[in-house]
Image (tube, helix red, strand yellow):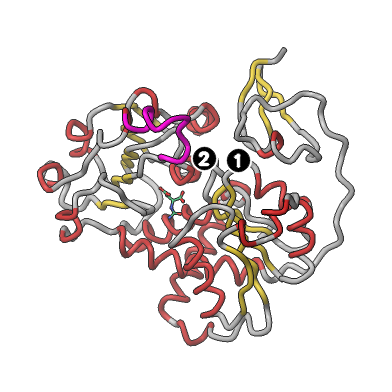
Amino acid sequence: MQTRHMIDLCDLSTEEWEELTSLACDIRDNMEAYAHVCDGRVMATLFYEPSTRTQMSFQTAMLRLGGQIIGFSDPENSSVAKGESLKDTVRVVSGYADLITMRHPMAGAAKVASMYSRVPVINAGDGGHLHPTQTLTDLVTLRNEKGRFDDLCIGMCGDLKNGRTVHSLLKTMSRFKGNRFVLISTPSLRIPLYVRDQLVKSGCEFVEADNLADVIGELDVLYMTRIQKERFASIEEYHEQSGVYILDGEKMKLAKEDMIVMHPLPRVDEIAIEVDDDSRAKYFEQTEYGLYARMALIMTMLKEPKKELATLPVGSLHCCGNPNCITNRELYVPRSFRRESDMLVCDYCDEHTLLP
Ligand code: NCD
C-alpha cells in the first residue's frame, strides 16, 4: 500500500481496495492461519466519541491477529480532560503503540493525528466528515453479497449531510464504472459540496429524491442511515428531521428480489424490526465483514516501520469557515488549503469557501 496512514479511503487505488477486500475474504475463510501474524504488536484505540462496533471490531481484529490493545473510549478518563492537546496525546501514544486507531468529533482530526504520529494512524471517523474503515467494511459486504463493485444502482437514504459513512462510501463507489446513485433525503440533509463535486467529477449519474417508496424499486443496494442527532445545532432541528424515512415490510415489497439493505448501525427507527427477518437485510452480516476488513487493514498497515516526525510547513493565514474543523480547535495546527476554481478548500475537513 502506498499510503502510510488511512485517513481517506480514496487515498488508495482501486487495486489496493481489491487487495484489501480479497485479503479480508481470505481471513474469513482461514481465520487460524492469521492467528499469530501480529504477535507482539500493540494497537492503541483513541476514541474521543462513542462507538460500539467500530471500536470493538478493531479491538477484536487485533486480538484475533495475536496482538495487544491499549487506549481509551472515554476521553474524560484520560489527560484530554486536563486539557492535553491532540498533538501531545498522539505523540506520546505513538511512542507506546505500533498503530493508532482514532475516532474524534471534529472533522480533520485523524489527519492532524497523522502529522504528529510516528506510527500509522487509522481514521475511525472524524466528525461528520469521513469513515474509511466503514467503507472498507461496505466493500467487503458488496463483494460477498453482490459479487461486484460496479454497475450498481445504489440508494443512500437518511442523513446524507452529516453521515460520514455516506460521504466515504459515495466517494469510493463513484470510482467504479457504471454505478448510479439515488440520494434520498429531505432538502436540508443533502450531501455536502465536497461529495457532490466528487460525484460530478466522476461522471457517475446521480439523482436526488425525497420519497423512498417512489425509488426503492430501482435499487440494487439500499444504504439506510441514522439521522445524526449529535451533529445538529439544536434538538428542535433534529426533531424536524427524525422519523421521516422508515424502511418497513410494506416498502420492502416494492424492492427488487435481489436488492440488499445495508446500514452501518446503530439504527434508531429508520429500519423497522420486521425487516431484520427479510433475507435481503444484510446489516448484521455487514458488522461481521467489518471484523475481517479491519483485520486485513491492521495487518497491512503494521508492515510500516516507525518513522521520525517531519517538520511541518508554515500554515496559511486564512481560517477555515467550518466551526467543526479541527483547525478551529487545535490552534497550533498549520492551516492548509487547496484552490479549486473560485473556491478555497480546507485540506483537513474539505469545507469550501469562496475565494476572498
Ligand atoms: C456510524 C458512525 O459512527 O459514523 N457507525 C459506525 O461506525 N458503524 C454510523 C452512525 O453512527 O450513524
- Indicate which disc residue 302 carries: none
Q: Is residue 85 depicted above or below 218 in this figure?
A: below
Q: Is residue 31 above or below residue 303?
A: below
Which part of the image, by quadrant, shows the N terminus? bottom right
The answer to whether 187 is drawn above or below residue 242 in the figure is: above
Whole-percent x and y of residue 339? 71, 24
Dot 2 and dot 1 residues touching (CB under 8 Å): yes
Residue under label 1:
107
The quarter of the image holding the C terminus is top right
- Residue found at the very far top of the displayed protein: 356
User: Looking at the image, is mark 2 or mark 1 earlier in the sequence?
Assistant: 1
Give the residue drawn at x 34%, y 59%: 147
Q: Position of residue 191 (x, y in %)?
A: 44, 31
Residue under the point 68% across and 83% down: 40
Q: What predominant SS class does the magenta segment belong to?
A: helix
Asked whether residue 237 is drawn in magenta, I would say yes
Instruction: Tell whether 88 sits left or right of 5.
Output: right
Looking at the rendered structure, the secondary structure element under dot 2 is loop
Circle 2 is placed at which residue position? 128
Q: The magenta stretch spans which residues?
A: 229-239
In the image, residue 80 lies in the stretch drawn in magenta: no
At a point 51% along the width and 86% down the height, the residue shown is 33
Among the 4 quarters of the image, the one containing residue 122: bottom right
